[in-house]
Image: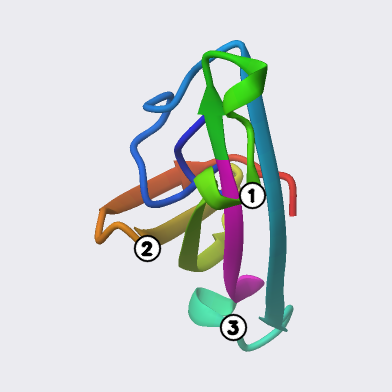
Amino acid sequence: MGGFLRLAGRERDAISGPHTGLARHIDYRELGKNGGIFDMPSYLGGSVEAGNAWQNRSEISVSSTIVYGSLFAGLDTFLDRVFLAAGFSEQEESSFYLYFGNPVL
């Protein structure tokens, strides 16, 4: 795990293990199909994510989860959606993303 909307304060695939957990809430707003930036649909949003990876089942607990969050802006282009995002964790980690495609929103 790790990366945009999958524990966003960490870089992509930075967290791994045989037992993983992820809970998230994503909220975004479309700014308008007409009159958006460059006259294309645009989006602003954020997420709150909690999760971790564990080597042993006995290590899994709510107290060992880490809280992450992100703020993002997106734009529908003629090729695909493009997102610019910043992710943060409660452990003061941060990552920045330029994401092409349609994430699970």
- Nearer the observer: mark 1 or 3; the answer is 1
What is the span of residues highlighted in magenta in the rendered image?
40-51
Measured Cα–Cα span from mark 2 to mark 1: 14 Å
The image shows residue 2 at horizontal and vertical percentages of 46, 36
Q: Main secondary structure of the magenta part?
A: strand
Q: Which residue corresponds to mark 2? A: 90
Where residue 74 appears, as percent x and y from the top left, is 54, 64
What amino acid is at disc 3? Gly
> Which amino acid is tagged 2?
Glu
Which amino acid is tagged 1?
Val
Residue to which mark 1 is pinned: 62
Asked whether 55 falls inside the magenta stretch, the response is no
- Going by the image, does 85 lie left or right of 43? left
Secondary structure under tag 1 reads helix
User: Residue 34's quadrant in the figure?
Assistant: bottom right
Q: Position of residue 46 (x, y in %)?
A: 57, 71
Determine whether, in the image, residue 34 is placed left or right of residue 55.
right
The stretch drawn in magenta includes residue 43: yes
Residue corresponding to mark 3: 36
Q: Secondary structure at mark 3?
A: loop
Query: Quick check: marks 2 and 1 in contact, CB under 8 Å?
Result: no
